[in-house]
C-alpha cells in the first residue's frame, strides 16, 4: 500500500534517534579537542629523521646523505646537500652526513616511500598531525634541526616497528664487529688481503 | 468566553492577560487600546521569535541525533546559545547584492515574506483567552495571508537575476497553486461540521470529552483524520519543507531562490519559513487537534496555552522527523501528487464529512455502521488512488549471472 | 517496459522535446551547472539546455582537476607512481594500487604469494563495500535526503577506514600494494576486526534498505529514470555496476579470474531495466556478495610470505616490454597499461579510468529528463573527479 515504505523509513530514523542516546555505536562522534584520537601504531603523517641520542641530535643522525629518498620521493619534496667532511655514525664508522636536509611538508604527500627505500633506517614517519602554521612558506619547510627526533621518540610512537629496527641494526653492528674481529685475527695470523667489506645497511 | 466562567483556581490561565492589563493600566484610558494591541504584537513576535531561534537549534540537534552525531554543542551549555551566535553571524556578514539584480525587489522580498508570514498568527487562538484578533472569517483570512508568501518567494527568485533562482521561483508558484487547493479542501469539512469560520468557535466545537477521557477532537473522526493528513501533507508543501522543498532544492538548484541572498536577508528567509511552518501547524492544531483543549478532563488544570504549545511542538517535531527521513519529490511528481491524489481525496472527504454530519443522530448499533461506512469512505479511495498513483513503481526482484 | 502515463513513473517523453525554440514557445534556458555546484561530486560542469525543466541538451565539461597523472608516471620510477594511483579514485586506493601492481607484476614477471592474493581480495572487497556504501549515501543525498543516509553510510565507511588506517597507516591514501605482494602483514587483531565488520555489515545493509529501498518517493524518483540500454552500454565501453545494471553479465572477477577470485563462490547481480534504481540496487546486492567473499577469504586465509622474494624495492628496472593489468574496481574496469624500455621509469603509462568512460554516456541518459533527474543520474553513474580528470 502507498506509504508503507515511508513509514518503514520513519521507523528507522526513529530507532536511530533513540539509539543515539544509549548506544555508542549509533553516536560514534569523537569530540576532538577534549577527546584525543587513539592513533593506530601504523598511522603515518610526515617524515622525521632518527637520531641516536636526544642530547646531540645533529651529531648522531643516522642519515648518511645517500640521497636515495630524494630520488625516490614521488613529489620530490626532499632536498639534501652532502657534507664535505665525515664524522663517525652510530656504529663508530666514518660517514658523510647531510649538511642540509629539508622537507617541504606543503608538498609531501605522506606516502612513506622514503621510509621504505632508506637502507639506513634513518627516516621514519611521524604521528604529529596538529601542524597548522601561521605562515605558508617558511613554517612548512622543515629543516634538519626541526626534523631530527631521537630514537626513543621513534620507540614511543611505533614500538613494534622500532624494536624490530633496533634488533636488525644491532645484528648488523654485531656482524660488522665479528667480521672486523675475524679480519683482525686473520691479519695477525697471516697478512692476507681483507675479506669483502661489510655492506652498509640491512636488506631492503 | 468571559473570565468569570473560569474557576478561580486556574489563575495561570489568566496570568498573561492580567499582566497585560496591569501594564496598560499605567497609561491613560485613551491610549489603552493601542497599548493592548502593541503588547499583543510584541508578545507574538517575542514568543515566536524565540520559538524560531530554538526550533532551528532543535532541528539541528534532532537531525544530528537521527544522523548519529551530536549536533551543535559548543556555544553555551548544550549549544543553547547557538541561535544567538548564528544571529550575530548573519547580522555581521556582508550583504552581497548581484549587480544585475533588481535592487528594490531584491531588498523587499525577504521583508515582505516575513511580514506576510507573521499575519497568520493574528487569528490563531493560543489559549482559552489568548487570541489576537477575533474574526468571523478567521480561517479565510489565515489562508489568504498564507498564500501571499509565495509571491514574495517569486519576487526573490525573479529579482535575483539568477537562473537557479528563476527556476526556483517558477517551482514555488507551481507548488503554491497545486497545494493551496488540497489545503483549502482539507479544512472545508471542519467548517461544515463546526458551522463557522471563526477559529475560536471551531476550537469551542471540539470541547468536551466522552467518558472524561476521549476528547471530541476532529482528528479522532474518520473524515477528520483524513482531513488532518491531507492538511499536513499540503502544509509541508506550503511551507517548502522536505520532501517538498523543491524551491530550495540544494542538490539541483543550489539554494533556489536563496542563491543570491546572504547575511541577514538570508536569515530572514529562514525566519519566514519557520514562522510559516509554525502558523500552519498552529492552524492544524486549531482545526483538527482541538486547539487549546486538554486531552482529558483530569488534565484541564494545566493551562490551555501549554496544551496548545505542546501540540504545536509535537507537529513541528514531526516536520523535523520527516525532513530527516524522506527524499525529495520531482516537480512533476509533486504536482501529480496534488492534483491526482490529494485533491480527489479531499473532495471525497467532503462527502464523508457530509455523511458524518447527516448521521449525527445514529446511536447504538447504527453508530458502528456509521463508523464502518465513514472509515470505508476514507480508506477505500486512499487505497485505490494510491495504487493508481504508484502504478509501475514497485520493489524489484533481481537475477544473477548464470556463470 | 512502458509505463502508463498516470503513474509517477511517466517520464517526460524525449520525443516531444523541442530542439529549437520558436516564437510560440519561450526561450530555452542554458544553465551552467558547476564547476561549483553541490551535486556535481567535485569540479565537474554540465552545460544544460533546458526547455522548462526538461533537458534538451547536456554538455559535460571536465578537466578542472587535471594534474598530469600519466605524464608524472612516465617521469618517476615505477614505485613512485604507486602513491599517485591512490589519488586517482580517492575512495578506492586499494583497488587502484592492485590494478597498478598487477600491471607491473605482469611486466616484470613477478609472482604473488597466496597469502598476499587473499589479502588483496579482502582489501578489494572492503573497498567495494566502502565505495558502494558511499555511492548509495551520495545518491540519496542527491535525491534530497537531508544527509541521513549519507551519514549512515559514512558511519560504516569510518569503520573500514579505521581498518585501513591501522593496516597501512593512512585512511584514504593507503599506498599498500607492492609489486609482488603487499607491504604489511596484518596482525591477528586486524583480521579479527575485519571479521567483526563483515559480521555486522549485513545488519547495516538491512537497516539502510529499510530506510529507503522500499520508499515510494525514492522508487518514483529513480525507477525509469536514466535508462541505459545494453547495446549503448557495450558500445560506449561502460563497465562495472552501471553495465551490469543494464543486464550485461560482465564482471572481470569472473571473466579474467585474476588474483584469488576463482577460489571464491559468489554471484553477479544483474539489472533488467538499466535505470537509476537498478544501478542502485545492483550495488546493494554486490555489497551482499562482497560480504560472502570476505567471509570465505577470512576463513581460508593461508599462512606464508606476503612478498615475492624476487621483488626489488630499490633499483627496480623491468625488462623492455608492455603489459596491461586490469581488475574489477568498484566503479568498473580499472586498468593500467605500461610500456617499459628497461629504464627505471615506464616509457608509457596509461590509465583506463572507469569513471571517465562511464561518464561519456551522461547526455544519453539525461535527455528528456528534468534537472532534478540529471543530478541523480550523475550520482548513479558514480564518478570521482580525481579519476575522470587524472
Image (tube, coloured by chain):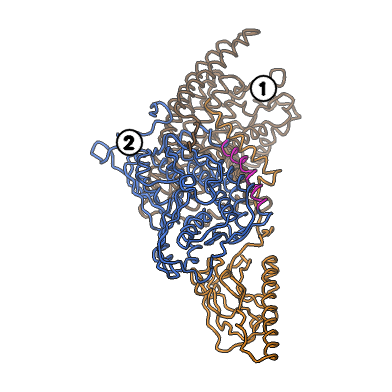
Across and down, in percent, residue B294 comes to 68, 27
* Chain depicted in orange: A
Chain under label 1?
A: B
- Circle 1: element type: strand
Give the spatial CA distance, label 1 vs label 2. Answer: 54 Å
Across and down, in percent, residue C108 comes to 47, 63
In the foreground, C331 or C372: C331
- Circle 2: element type: helix
- Residue C290's tag is none
Across and down, in percent, residue A51 comes to 65, 77
Residue occupying the far front of the picture: A190
> What residue appears at the point 69 percent right and 84 percent down from the top-left corner?
A182
Is C196 inside the magenta-drawn segment? Answer: yes
Is B280 inside the magenta-drawn segment? Answer: no
Query: What segment carries the magenta color?
Result: C191-209
Which residue is the site of mark 1?
B215
* Chain depicted in brown: B
In the foreground, C220 or C136: C136
* Mark 1 or 2, closer to the camera: 2
Which residue is the site of mark 2?
C14
Amino acid at each position: 500500500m502507498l506509504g508503507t515504505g515511508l513509514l518503514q523509513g520513519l521507523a528507522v530514523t526513529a530507532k536511530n534517534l533513540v539509539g543515539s542516546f544509549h548506544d555508542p555505536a549509533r553516536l560514534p562522534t569523537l569530540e576532538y579537542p577534549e577527546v584525543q584520537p587513539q592513533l593506530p601504531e601504523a598511522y603515518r603523517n610526515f617524515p622525521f629523521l632518527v637520531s641516536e641520542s636526544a642530547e646531540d641530535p645533529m651529531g648522531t643522525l643516522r642519515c648518511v646523505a645517500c640521497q636515495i629518498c630524494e630520488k625516490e620521493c614521488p613529489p620530490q619534496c626532499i632536498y639534501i646537500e652532502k657534507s664535505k667532511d665525515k664524522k663517525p655514525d652510530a656504529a663508530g664508522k666514518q660517514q658523510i652526513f647531510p649538511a642540509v636536509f629539508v622537507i617541504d611538508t606543503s608538498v609531501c604527500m605522506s606516502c612513506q616511500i622514503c621510509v621504505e627505500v632508506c637502507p639506513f633506517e634513518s627516516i621514519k614517519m611521524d604521528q604529529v598531525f596538529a601542524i597548522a602554521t601561521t605562515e605558508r612558506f617558511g613554517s612548512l619547510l622543515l629543516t634538519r634541526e626541526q626534523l631530527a627526533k631521537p630514537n626513543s621518540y621513534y620507540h614511543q610512537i611505533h614500538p613494534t616497528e622500532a624494536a624490530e629496527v633496533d634488533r636488525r641494526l644491532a645484528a648488523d653492528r654485531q656482524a660488522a664487529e665479528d667480521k672486523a674481529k675475524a679480519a683482525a685475527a686473520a691479519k695477525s695470523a697471516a697478512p692476507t688481503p681483507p675479506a669483502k667489506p661489510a655492506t652498509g645497511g640491512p636488506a631492503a | 468566553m468571559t473570565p468569570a466562567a473560569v474557576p478561580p483556581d486556574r489563575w495561570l490561565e489568566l496570568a498573561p492577560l492580567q499582566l497585560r492589563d496591569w501594564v496598560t493600566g499605567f497609561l491613560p484610558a485613551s491610549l489603552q487600546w493601542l497599548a493592548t494591541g502593541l503588547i499583543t504584537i510584541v508578545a507574538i513576535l517575542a514568543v515566536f521569535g524565540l520559538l524560531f531561534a530554538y526550533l532551528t537549534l532543535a532541528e539541528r540537534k534532532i537531525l544530528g541525533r537521527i544522523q548519529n552525531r551530536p549536533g551543535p554543542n559548543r556555544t553555551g551549555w548544550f549549544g543553547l546559545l547557538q541561535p544567538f551566535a548564528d544571529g550575530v553571524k548573519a547580522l555581521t556578514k556582508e550583504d552581497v547584492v548581484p549587480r544585475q539584480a533588481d535592487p528594490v525587489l531584491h531588498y523587499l522580498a525577504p521583508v515582505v515574506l516575513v511580514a506576510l508570514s507573521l499575519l497568520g498568527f493574528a487569528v490563531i487562538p493560543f489559549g482559552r483567552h489568548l487570541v489576537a484578533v477575533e474574526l468571523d472569517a478567521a480561517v479565510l483570512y489565515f489562508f489568504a495571508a498564507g498564500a501571499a508568501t509565495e509571491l514574495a518567494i517569486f519576487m526573490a527568485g525573479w529579482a535575483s537575476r539568477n537562473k537557479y533562482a528563476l527556476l526556483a521561483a517558477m517551482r514555488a508558484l507551481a507548488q503554491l497553486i497545486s497545494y493551496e487547493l488540497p489545503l483549502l479542501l482539507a479544512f472545508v469539512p471542519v467548517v461544515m461540521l463546526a458551522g463557522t469560520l471563526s477559529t475560536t468557535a471551531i476550537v469551542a466545537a471540539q470541547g468536551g470529552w466522552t467518558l472524561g477521557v476521549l476528547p471530541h477532537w476532529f482528528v479522532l473522526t474518520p473524515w477528520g483524520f483524513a482531513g488532518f493528513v491531507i492538511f499536513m501533507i499540503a502544509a509541508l508543501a506550503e511551507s517548502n519543507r522536505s520532501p517538498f522543498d523543491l524551491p530550495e532544492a540544494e542538490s539541483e538548484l543550489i539554494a533556489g531562490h536563496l542563491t543570491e541572498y546572504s547575511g541577514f536577508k538570508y536569515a530572514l528567509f529562514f525566519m519566514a519559513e519557520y514562522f510559516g511552518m509554525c502558523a500552519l501547524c498552529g492552524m492544524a492544531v486549531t482545526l483538527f487537534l482541538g486547539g487549546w483543549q486538554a486531552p482529558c478532563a483530569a488534565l484541564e488544570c494545566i493551562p490551555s496555552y501549554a496544551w496548545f504549545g505542546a501540540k504545536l511542538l509535537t507537529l513541528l517535531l514531526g516536520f523535523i522527523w520527516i525532513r530527516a527521513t524522506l527524499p525529495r519529490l520531482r516537480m512533476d511528481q509533486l504536482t501529480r501528487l496534488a492534483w491526482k491524489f490529494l485533491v480527489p481525496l479531499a473532495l471525497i472527504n467532503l462527502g464523508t464529512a457530509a455523511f458524518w454530519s447527516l448521521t449525527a443522530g445514529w446511536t447504538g448499533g447504527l453508530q458502528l455502521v456509521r463508523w464502518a461506512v465513514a472509515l470505508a469512505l476514507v480508506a477505500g479511495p486512499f487505497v485505490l488512488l494510491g495504487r493508481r498513483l504508484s502504478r509501475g513503481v514497485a520493489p524489484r526482484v533481481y537475477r544473477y549471472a548464470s556463470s | 517496459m512502458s509505463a502508463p502515463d498516470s503513474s509517477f513513473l511517466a517520464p517526460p517523453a524525449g520525443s516531444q522535446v523541442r530542439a529549437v525554440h520558436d516564437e510560440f514557445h519561450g526561450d530555452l534556458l542554458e544553465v551552467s551547472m558547476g564547476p561549483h555546484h553541490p551535486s556535481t561530486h567535485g569540479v565537474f560542469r554540465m552545460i544544460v539546455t533546458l526547455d522548462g525543466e526538461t533537458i534538451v541538451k547536456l554538455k559535460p565539461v571536465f578537466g578542472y582537476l587535471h594534474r598530469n597523472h600519466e605524464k608524472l608516471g612516465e617521469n618517476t620510477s615505477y614505485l613512485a607512481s604507486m602513491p599517485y594511483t591512490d589519488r586517482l579514485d580517492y575512495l578506492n586506493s586499494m583497488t587502484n594500487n592492485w590494478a597498478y601492481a598487477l600491471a607491473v607484476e605482469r611486466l616484470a614477471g613477478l609472482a604473488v604469494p597466496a597469502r598476499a592474493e587473499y589479502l588483496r581480495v579482502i582489501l578489494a572487497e572492503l573497498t567495494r563495500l566502502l565505495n558502494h556504501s558511499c555511492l548509495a549515501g551520495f545518491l540519496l543525498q542527491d535525491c534530497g535526503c537531508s544527509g541521513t543516509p549519507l551519514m549512515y553510510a559514512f558511519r560504516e565507511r569510518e569503520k573500514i577506514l579505521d581498518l585501513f588506517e591501522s593496516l597501512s597507516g593512512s585512511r584514504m591514501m593507503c599506498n599498500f600494494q607492492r609489486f609482488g605482494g603487499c607491504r604489511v602483514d596484518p596482525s591477528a587483531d586486524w583480521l579479527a576486526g575485519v571479521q567483526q565488520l563483515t559480521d555486522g555489515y549485513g545488519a547495516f545493509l538491512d537497516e539502510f534498505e529499510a530506510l529507503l529501498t522500499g520508499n515510494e518517493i525514492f522508487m518514483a524518483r529513480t525507477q525509469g529514470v536514466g535508462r541505459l540500454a545494453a547495446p549503448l552500454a557495450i558500445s560506449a565501453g561502460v563497465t562495472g555496476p552501471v553495465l551490469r545494471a543494464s543486464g550485461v553479465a560482465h564482471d572481470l572477477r569472473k571473466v579474467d579470474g585474476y588474483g584469488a577470485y576463482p577460489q571464491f563462490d559468489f554471484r553477479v547481480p544483474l539489472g533488467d531495466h538499466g535505470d537509476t534504481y537498478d544501478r542502485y540496487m545492483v550495488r546493494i546486492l554486490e555489497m551482499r556478495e562482497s560480504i560472502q567473499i570476505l567471509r570465505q577469504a577470512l576463513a581460508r586465509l593461508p599462512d606464508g610470505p606476503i612478498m615475492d622474494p624476487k621483488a626489488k624495492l630499490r633499483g627496480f628496472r623491468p625488462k623492455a616490454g608492455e603489459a596491461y593489468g586490469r581488475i574489477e574496481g568498484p566503479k568498473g574496469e580499472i586498468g593500467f597499461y605500461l610500456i617499459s624500455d628497461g629504464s627505471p621509469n615506464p616509457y608509457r603509462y596509461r590509465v583506463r579510468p572507469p569513471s571517465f568512460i562511464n561518464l561519456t554516456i551522461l547526455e544519453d541518459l539525461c535527455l528528456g529528463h528534468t534537472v532534478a533527474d540529471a543530478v541523480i543520474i550523475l550520482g548513479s553513474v558514480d564518478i570521482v573527479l580525481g579519476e575522470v580528470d587524472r
